[in-house]
């Protein structure tokens, strides 16, 4: 065989190899595309876009898609925000604000009195010539992976401002290292690839066939998901949060909106750690010595602060990673009015808590640095609420349990947000002061009945795990018990407060909904009328608390 013949036979081989590789890749992709299209044509599955077309009082709008969060939750456990709609046409003179975050941003235990509602009424009162649309997209159990997708879904809705109040669920939320909801410890590209697949019709079908339906049981579901502060998984969680936050800011800014990023305020004084873990490689002899010192301190910490502190500090010299120990030390410093030292140890106790339901110091550092790096405004909620606390340490007067703010806490945060927003709206004129807390609560119809309802809700929550495992659980119950008693407010006075607020803002759906909830026990027909007026969009069914359909 001569050289020319050999060249003729070998030349096509690289082309054949390239063709084989392309066929191996393109044919499966083509099959998947055909299957995906076929499932869509057959109406198998559902769209997971954030918004879906709807009408509100006959006017075109975009409404929250109830299937949006399915890629992030197991079947039967999907969490949704308070349903919202956005007018298709943005009226002239309208300032549109989107609030992003988790349950604390939503305003839990009742979004009617979250900081976004206080902010909305502050702006309405002080700038009556403008129209304000404040859309709160906050939802239970989500985290920054979901928040980013929400921002992307809102980018074409002509936003003026995004407010980001996020960070509590980075460990326990979807794809966090302590979650019960999805895979854990994944990098950002892997998370985004996973959620993209789960949003396809093929992914929905595979997920439906491969998983059993489960029920949501709140925080107690995560009892076995402890993650120590020095876990390598936390490095990935922080990296994911940093990237998602910066990407969320970038999406908002690309849409032409301003951005406010807030740090997250948490209850550190009156919320003991939910769980603690010893340091690795603690020798059994060291553990026995540590336990003896803890017991000695516990026996006297109510009567002899000096001896108790000595015992606790000796225990910390053996193992300083046990969150409850830090909390005990903090309480002694607080009792001695050494608030600076107390605050340091309270914060460290929170950061060491291995059931990570609260944003820690690193998350708030990321909030601050992310805002600075991307040119967003910063509201330091942690500082705002700390400064408002008599001892500089946030407790249950501003945050009910671990992260959910009281009306007073929500007012303070809204006031800080207002201070960032109002100067731009005043257009060089003197910026008006925000309404007082009492004025806002009158506009919100925060009645004595509603205050009792909120506290009663929290009193019930505190009687379930993981709160029952906290060192100061009995103190928490005692603190809330008085507020959980039925209110002394005359029902006629409650009605008058609602009627006054509705007369001021007759189109406010939340006012009608809460008024209807109050009226159920007194006048079902009037309750049904009020609840019917709170319909989020045309055709959406509304019900009385007993399940009776209103509309």
Image (cartoon, grey):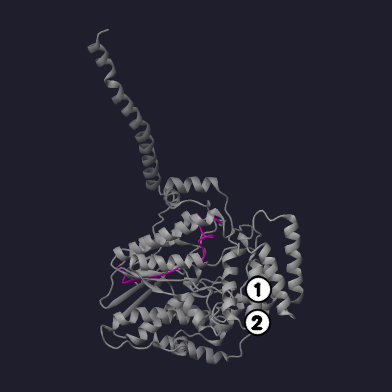
Residue found 50% across the figure and 83% down from its top: 388
Closer to us: 214 or 282: 282
Residue pictured at 60% horizontal, 62% vertical: 355
User: Could you say whether the residue bearing mark 2 is in a helix, strand or loop?
Assistant: helix
Q: Distance between the Cα atoms at labels 2 and 1?
A: 10 Å
Q: Measuring 48% from the left and 71% from the top, which residue is drawn there? A: 264
Which of 318 and 229 lies nearest the eye of the viewer? 318
* Residue 529 visible in image: no
Coordinates of residue 186 in the picture (x, y in percent): 49, 51
The answer to whether residue 367 is seen in the rendering is yes
Relative to 223, 55 lies left or right? left
Estimate the x, y position of residue 462 in percent, counting from the top left.
64, 72
- Confirm whether the magenta stretch covers residue 162: yes
Residue 312 quadrant? bottom right
* Frontmost residue, 54 versus 504: 504
Mark closer to the chain start, 2 or 1: 1
Q: Are marks 2 and 1 in contact (CB under 8 Å)?
A: no
The residue indicated by pointer 2 is: 335
Secondary structure mainly formed by the magenta segment: loop
**Which residue lies at the image location 36% right of the left edge and 83% below the top edge?**
124
Residue 251 falls within the magenta-colored stretch: no
Range drawn in magenta? 158-177
The kind of secondary structure element at disc 1 is helix
Which residue, given by chain and number where applicable, does mark 1 sit on? Answer: 329
Say whether residue 383 is left or right of residue 40: right
Above or below 193: residue 342? below
Report the residue that reaches farthest toward the top.
1
Q: Position of residue 422 (x, y in %)?
A: 33, 82
Q: Percent from the top left, x then y, of residue 352?
A: 59, 64
Quarter of the N terminus within the rendering = top left
Residue 35 sits in quarter: top left
């Amino acid at each position: 065989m001569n050289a020319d013949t050999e060249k003729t036979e070998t030349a096509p081989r690289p082309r054949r190899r390239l063709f084989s590789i392309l066929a191996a890749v393109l044919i499966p992709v083509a099959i998947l595309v055909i299957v995906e299209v076929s499932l869509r044509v057959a109406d198998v599955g559902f769209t997971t876009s954030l918004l879906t077309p709807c009408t509100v009082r006959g006017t075109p709008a975009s409404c929250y898609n109830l299937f949006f969060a399915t890629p992030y939750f197991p079947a039967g456990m999907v969490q949704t925000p308070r349903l919202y709609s956005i007018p298709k046409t943005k009226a002239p003179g309208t300032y549109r604000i989107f609030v992003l975050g988790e349950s604390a941003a939503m305003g839990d235990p009742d979004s009617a009195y979250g900081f976004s509602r206080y902010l909305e009424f502050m702006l309405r009162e002080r700038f009556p010539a403008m129209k304000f649309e404040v859309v709160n997209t906050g939802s239970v159990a989500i985290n920054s992976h979901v928040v980013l997708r929400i921002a992307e879904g809102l980018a074409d809705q002509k936003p003026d401002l995004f407010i980001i109040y996020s960070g509590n669920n980075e460990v326990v939320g979807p794809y966090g290292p302590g979650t019960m909801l999805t895979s854990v410890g994944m990098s950002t590209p892997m998370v985004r690839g996973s959620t993209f697949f789960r949003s396809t019709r093929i992914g929905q079908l595979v997920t439906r066939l491969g998983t059993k339906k489960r029920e949501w049981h709140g925080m107690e579901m995560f009892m076995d998901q402890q993650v120590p502060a020095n876990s390598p998984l936390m490095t990935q969680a922080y990296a994911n949060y940093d990237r998602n936050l910066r990407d969320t800011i970038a999406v908002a800014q690309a849409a032409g909106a301003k951005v406010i990023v807030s740090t997250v305020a948490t209850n550190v004084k009156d919320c003991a750690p939910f769980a603690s873990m010893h340091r690795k490689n603690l020798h059994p002899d060291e553990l026995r010595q540590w336990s003896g010192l803890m017991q000695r301190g516990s026996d006297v910490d109510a009567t002899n602060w000096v001896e108790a502190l000595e015992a606790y500090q000796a225990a910390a010299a053996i193992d300083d990673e046990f969150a409850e120990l830090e909390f005990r030390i903090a309480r002694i410093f607080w009792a001695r009015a050494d608030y600076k030292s107390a605050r340091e140890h309270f914060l460290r106790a929170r950061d060491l808590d291995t059931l990570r339901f609260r944003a820690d110091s690193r998350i708030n550092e990321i909030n601050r640095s992310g805002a600075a790096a991307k040119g967003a405004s910063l509201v330091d909620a942690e500082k705002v609420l700390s400064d408002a606390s008599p001892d500089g340490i946030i407790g249950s007067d501003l945050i009910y349990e671990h992260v959910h703010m009281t009306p007073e806490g929500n007012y303070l945060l809204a006031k800080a947000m207002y201070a960032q927003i109002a100067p731009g709206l005043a257009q060089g004129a003197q910026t008006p002061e925000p309404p007082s807390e009492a004025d806002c609560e009158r506009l919100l119809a925060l009645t004595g009945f509603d205050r009792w309802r909120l506290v009663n809700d929290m009193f019930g929550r505190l009687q379930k795990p993981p709160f029952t495992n906290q060192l100061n659980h009995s103190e928490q119950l005692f603190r809330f018990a008085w507020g959980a008693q039925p209110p002394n407010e005359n029902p006629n006075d409650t009605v008058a407060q609602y009627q006054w607020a509705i007369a001021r803002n007759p189109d406010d759906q939340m006012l009608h909904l809460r008024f209807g909830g109050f009226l159920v026990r007194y006048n079902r027909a009037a309750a049904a009328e009020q609840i019917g007026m709170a319909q989020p969009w045309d055709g959406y069914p509304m019900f009385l608390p007993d399940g009776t359909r209103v509309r």
